[in-house]
Amino acid sequence: MTDELEEIRKQKLEEIRNGERRTDEDASADASPSELVHVGGAEELQETVGDGVVLVDFYADWCDPCKQLEPVVERVAAGTDATVAKVDIDANQQPAVQYGIRSMPTLLLFADREPVEHLVGMQQEPRLRSLIESYA
């Protein structure tokens, strides 16, 4: 699974370098609630958090705690109807600034387009599931 994610990251980076952008229809067709949604900027993040309960993982590739949290976030995404999104703060600094992200990893839980929970550092899967369920 890690090799697959690394390949997706490389593809995304290449798309960014080439100025390619996926449309919302492309993203919707590829991602179901059980899959992670990789967000490519502030505008895309606003669209992503627009519906229901959304857990957003702000991470960086160089961040070891982010790497440790990644499988937890993947399991949460696979086991919930809520949308789970990831924002690479190195490639997308504007959303990190907008939401005051100062430490990695940081998770924001959105409900009805508003951030309702702000979690910093390693989190346990049961806690994340419980938070999501409390706003669902």
Image (spheres, rainbow, N blue to C red):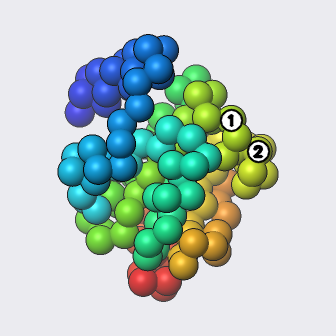
Taking the spot 47% from the left edge, 44% from the top edge, the residue there is 39
Q: Residue 94 vs residue 78: left or right? A: right
Which disc number belongs to residue 97? Answer: 2
Tag 2 secondary structure: helix
Q: Residue 52 vs residue 56: left or right? A: left
Q: Residue 59 vs residue 20: left or right? A: right
Disc 1 designates what residue? 93
Which disc number belongs to residue 39? Answer: none
Taking the spot 36% from the left edge, 49% from the top edge, the residue there is 24
Q: Are marks 1 and 2 in contact (CB under 8 Å)?
A: yes
Q: Amino acid at mark 1?
A: Gln
Can residue 67 be seen here? yes
Residue 86's place in the image compared with 1, above or below, is below
Instruction: Give the percent coordinates (x, y) of residue 45.
Output: 54, 52
Instruction: Give the percent coordinates (x, y) of residue 54.
Output: 47, 66
Tag 1 secondary structure: helix
| Crowding near the residue tagged with mark 1, few <14, some 14–19, many ≥20 C-alpha atoms within 10 Å | some
Q: Residue 57 vs residue 96: left or right? A: left
